Amino acid sequence: MTGGEIGTLGIGILLVLLAFRIPVAFSMFLVGFVGIWVLNGWNAAMGLLASETFTLASNPELIVVPVFIPMGNVASFTGMSSALYDAAYALVGRVRGGLAHATVIGCGGFAALSGSSVASALTMGKVSLAQMDRFNYDTRLPTGVVAAGSTLGILIPPSTGFVIYAILTEQSIGRLFLAGVLPGLLLLAMFMLVMAILCWIWPEFGAPGPITTLAEKGRALVGAIPILGVVTATIGGIYGGFFSPPEAAGVGAALVMVYGALTGRMTLAATREAGRDSIITTATVMLILIAAHMINPFLALSHIPTAVGEAMAALNLGVYGTLAVIMVIYLILGCFLEGFAMLVLTLPIFFPVIVALGIDPIWFGVLVVLTLEMGLIPPPVGLNVFVVKSVAPGVPLGRIFQGVLPFWVAMLVTLLLLIVFPQISLFPPDTMFN
Amino acid sequence: MGAIRALADRLIGLSATIGIIGIFAQVAVIVTDVIGRAFGAPLYGSQDIVTMVLVIVVFGGMALCDRKGGHIGVDLLEHWFPDWLNRAIDIAAALLGALIFTMIAIAVWESAKLSQMLNLCTNLMRWPKAWFQWALCGFALMAAAGMILRAVELTFLRRDVRREPGV
C-alpha cells in the first residue's frame, strides 16, 4: 500500500471509531500511533509517543489552559458573572427586549472570561432565564439568546478557541486575541439587531423591563467593576507588554480568587469545586491536544494534506472559492462534531492549503473559530441548546431551536462580512503589532 | 468489588487533589513572578516550576476525567444503537483508553531512563526531568487502572460509575 492509501484508510478508520462513540482522543491516538508504526516502524511510534506526551504536558504556552479555566469557574462561583448581567440590565433593560439585550452582553462578558461557551450558557441561563420568564418573554427569545449569546466568548479575548488554534498552527496568541475583538463586537451588535427586529415585529417577544433609578444603575455598574477590572487587567497587561498570555491567565485567576476571598464567597468547598471542574476540563483538552500531535505526523507522513492541497489547487477556486469550500465543510461538520475536536482533526489538512494560497492565518483563525461556534447551536447536536434545555426543562427543544435560528443566521451574515472585509479582523493586530 | 471501587476512588481523588493543588501553585508562582518582575526581582526559575507542575496538573486529572466521563465522544448515533452495543462500545472504549495510558506510561518510562542517563534537567532549577516523567507514568498508570476497573464493572456488574456521584 502507498502512504496515501494508508492515510486514507486511517482517516476512514478514524471516522468509524468516532461514529461508534469511541472518545475523540482515544480514536486519534490509536490511528496516529498505528499509522506511524506501519509507515515508520515501532520505535518511531514509541519515540513520538514519549516525546510528544511530555513535551506538550510541559509546554509553557499551554499553561493558559489550566489557568484560564479556573478563572471562569471562580468568577461564576463568586457571583461576578451575575454582577455583569445586573449592570447590563441597568443600562439597557428599559428598552423593548431589554432583558434579552442585557443577557447577550452578560453572556459575551462571561464567555470571554471563562473561555467556555457551554459554561457561559449554563451560568447565564441560570441567572437570566427566570428573570425573562417573570416578564412573560416568549420562551423562544430567552433560550435562543442564552444559547447563541454564549458563543460570543470564542471571539472576545481571552478565548481558549484562539489559544488552541494558535498552538496547533504556531501563530501568535496575542495577534489572534486582538483579531477577535472587532468581529466579537460586530457579532454582539448583530445579535442585538436581531433582537430589536424580532421585538419590533412581534412585541410579545420581549416586553420592556421595569424602570431602574439612577441610584440602582450606579449600584449595578459599581458591582460590575471587579469583572471589568479583571478583563481590563488581563487584556491590557498583554497588550501593554507587562506580561505574556500565560501570565495574564495566572494574574486573572489570582484576581478573581482574591475578589472571592475578600467577599467571603470563595469558600473551601467552592475552591475545591472550581479546581475539580478545571482539572477535568484541562485533562480533556490536553489529551486531545497530545492525540492531535500523534495523528498530525501520521497524516504528514501519508502526504494526505499535500494531496488535498493539490486537489484544491487543481480546482482553481482561488482564495475566496477555497475559503468558501472549507467554511461549508466546517459548517456541515459542525452539525455533527464537537468544535474543538473538529479543529484538531481538520487543521492538519486545511492549514497547509491556506498557507499555500497565501491566506492570512490570523484571518483564517477568526473565521474558523466563529464557524466552530456556529456548530454549537444548530440541530442535531447543538450542545449549547441542550445546556439551555437542562436549565429550562419546561421549554420544548423544538422551541429552543426555533429561538436560536435567527441568531445562527446573524452569525452566518457576520461570517460573510468577515470574509468580504478581512480588515475587520486584521486591522487591530496589524496596527498594534506592525 | 465495592472495596476495590472505594480504594480506586480514593486514589483518583488523591491524584486529582495533587493536580488541583498544582493549578493553584501555578497561579501563585506566576503572580509572584509578575509582581516581582515589576519591582526588578522576578522569581528565580518560575518558568521551570510552572512547566514541570503543568505535567502534574495535566496527568493528575486524567483518572478523574475518565471517572466523571469527561472524554469527548461523538454520541450522534448512540440512541440508534441497541443497549448491548452501547455497553460493548463503553467497555471497548475503556479498555482502549487503558491500553493507551499504559503505552504512554511505558514510552515515557523508557524516555525517563534516557533522561536519567543523560542527566537532563530543567534550565534554572536543575530539577531532573526524570522525576516528572516518573510522576507522569504513575498518573497514567492510575488512569489506566481506573479504566480497567470501569470495564470490569461494566462487563460483570453492568455498572457505569461515570453516571454516579463520588470522588
Image (cartoon, coloured by chain):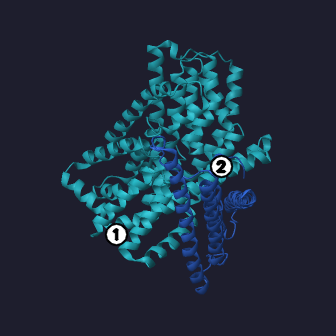
Chain colours: A cyan, B blue
Residue at coordinates 28% horizontally, 62% vertically from top-left?
A: A306
Q: Is residue A211 visible?
A: yes
Chain at numbered mark 1: A
Q: Is residue A131 above or below residue B136?
A: above
Image coords of residue B86 (percent x, y): 51, 48
Q: Compared to A292, does A425 lie above or below?
A: above
The image quadrant of residue B64 is bottom right
| Quarter of the picture holding the N terminus of chain B | bottom right
Q: Name the residue tied to disc 2.
A: A277
Q: Is residue A382 above or below residue B52?
A: above
Please name the amino acid that badge 2 sits on. Answer: Asp
Q: Nearer the viewer, residue A232 or A252?
A: A252
Badge 2: chain ID: A
Residue A247 appearing in the image: no
Above/below status of A87 relative to A59: above
Q: Are marks 1 and 2 on the same chain?
A: yes
Q: Position of residue A138 (x, y in %)?
A: 53, 18
| Residue wearing tag 1 | A301
Residue A45: give x, y in percent of width and height: 45, 73
Mark 1 to mark 2: distance in Å? 37 Å
Badge 1, how many Cα within 10 Å: few under 14, some, many 20+?
Answer: some
In the image, what residue occupies the spot 50% across and 53% down? B89
- Nearer to me, A363 or B165: B165
Q: Mark 1 or 2 closer to N-term?
A: 2
Mark 2 residue crowding within 10 angstroms, few (<14) / some (14–19) / many (20+): some
